[in-house]
């Protein structure tokens, strides 16, 4: 079985595990722009000791060329504590922002990993 067969995808408006990429309406080749990536944009994802998003990765696939990993974010605090599950003082929500500069059009692909429901993906087209 190939890993691609394990990746799930859906509309983020109806599925809380799908990573969501938010890009500016206009992107200019060679100029930095802001990218927001999150899980739970429309439907909140639980962020508990038992059920959480562990990480989000973002890749760029230029129209010509190989896939490039451009960002990776880990979310490590989910309410764990010596006092017990969900008793801790810190909960990291799966939402990150970064700047990116591209010189070619292509696709941004986001993957996220839920400790219970596995690997999810979505994509956004980058055009100049």
Image (spheres, grey):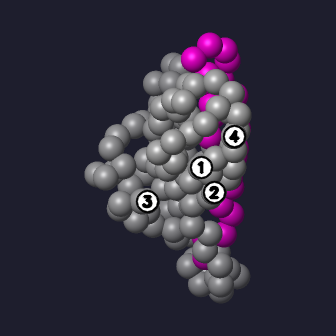
Residue at 31% from the left image edge and 52% from the top image edge: 13
Residue at 56% from the left image edge and 25% from the top image edge: 106
Residue 90 in the image: x percent, y percent?
65, 78
What is the spatial separation of the Cα atoms under label 3 and label 2, in whole angstroms? 15 Å
Report the side of 48 relative to 82 (left or right): left
Instruction: Pick whichever of labels 2 and 1 is earlier in the sequence.
Output: 1
Residue 63 highlighted magenta (yes or no): yes
Instruction: Pick whichever of labels 3 and 2 is earlier in the sequence.
Output: 3
Instruction: Pick whichever of labels 2 and 4 is earlier in the sequence.
Output: 4
Residue 112 in the image: x percent, y percent?
55, 46
The number of numbered discs placed on residues in the rendered structure image is: 4
Q: Secondary structure at mark 2?
A: strand
Part of the protein shown in magenta: 58-79
Instruction: Pick whichever of labels 3 and 1 is earlier in the sequence.
Output: 1
Instruction: Pick whichever of labels 4 and 3 is earlier in the sequence.
Output: 4
What is the spatial separation of the Cα atoms under label 4 and label 1, in whole angstroms? 13 Å
Which residue carries the number 4 mark? 31
Which residue carries the number 3 mark? 40
């Amino acid at each position: 079985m190939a890993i691609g067969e394990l990746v799930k995808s859906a509309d983020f408006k109806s599925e809380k595990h799908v990573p969501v990429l938010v890009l500016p309406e206009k992107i200019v080749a060679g100029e930095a722009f802001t990218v927001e990536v999150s899980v739970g944009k429309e439907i909140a994802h639980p962020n508990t000791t038992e059920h959480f998003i562990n990480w989000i990765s973002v890749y760029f696939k230029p129209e010509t060329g190989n896939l490039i990993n451009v960002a990776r974010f880990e979310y490590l605090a989910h309410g764990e504590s010596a006092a017990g599950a969900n008793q801790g003082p810190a909960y990291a929500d799966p939402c990150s922002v970064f700047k990116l500069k591209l010189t070619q059009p292509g696709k941004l692909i986001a993957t996220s990993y839920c400790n219970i429901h596995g690997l999810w993906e979505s994509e956004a087209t980058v055009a100049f």
